[in-house]
């Protein structure tokens, strides 16, 4: 029984470490941005701002952090008006999946 508990503690510790390494995703606006992008692959800046109810400056700040980490890309598109398109990168998809899987394991320990 103690061996099983020790094994669980080790795996939980490794999951906790994974969550801490990706602490920037844990911040509520960034987690929401990553979640929406994971579902939709790309979203316009204005739509993202409206859905998340963030100011343009606040959203821009969080997107710059996610871009710096390589999780999102931002491009300009010209339509009948200029658009800013935010897309999740392959690295962003992979890290978000790992983050959610680790979170799921940790949450399953709650009775």
Image (spheres, helix red, strand yellow):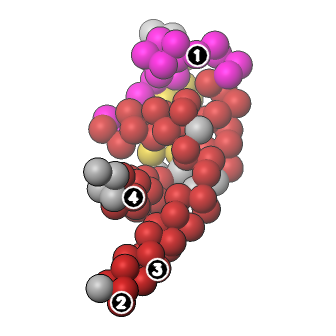
Q: Earlier in the sequence, mark 3 or mark 2?
A: 2
Q: Circle 4 sits in a helix, a strand or a loop, which is it?
A: helix
Q: Nearer the viewer, residue 48 or 12?
A: 12
Q: Main secondary structure of the magenta part?
A: helix
Q: Residue at x 55, y 44 (%)?
A: 26
Q: Residue at x 38, y 33 (%)?
A: 36
State if disc 2 and disc 1 touch (CB < 8 Å): no
| Corner quadrant of residue 70 | bottom right
Task: Please tell me how many numbered marks the rendered image carries.
Answer: 4
- Provide the residue span drawn in magenta: 40-58
Q: Nearer the viewer, mark 3 or mark 2?
A: 2
State if disc 4 and disc 1 touch (CB < 8 Å): no
Residue 66 x %, y %: 61, 44
Which residue position holds label 3? 10
Give the Cα distance between marks 4 and 3: 12 Å
Whether residue 76 is visible:
yes
- Labelled disc at residue 54: 1
Q: Circle 2 sits in a helix, a strand or a loop, which is it?
A: helix
**Residue density around tag 3, few if under 14, some if 14–19, many if 20 or more, within 10 Å:** few
Q: Residue at x 52, y 22 (%)?
A: 45
Q: Earlier in the sequence, mark 4 or mark 3?
A: 3
Give the Cα distance between marks 3 and 2: 11 Å
Whether residue 70 is visible:
no
Q: Nearer the viewer, mark 1 or mark 4?
A: 4
Which residue position holds label 2? 3
Please say whether residue 44 is one of the residues in the magenta stretch: yes
Which residue position holds label 4? 106
């Amino acid at each position: 029984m103690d061996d099983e508990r020790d094994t669980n503690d080790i795996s939980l510790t490794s999951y906790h470490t994974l969550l801490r390494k990706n602490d920037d995703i844990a911040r509520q606006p960034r987690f929401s941005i990553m979640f929406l992008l994971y579902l939709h692959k790309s979203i316009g800046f204005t739509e993202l701002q409206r859905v998340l109810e963030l100011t343009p400056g606040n959203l821009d700040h969080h997107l710059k952090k996610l871009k710096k980490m390589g999780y999102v890309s931002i491009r300009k598109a010209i339509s009948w008006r200029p658009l800013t398109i935010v897309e999740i990168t392959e690295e962003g998809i992979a890290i978000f999946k790992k983050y959610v899987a680790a979170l799921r394991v940790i949450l399953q320990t709650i009775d």
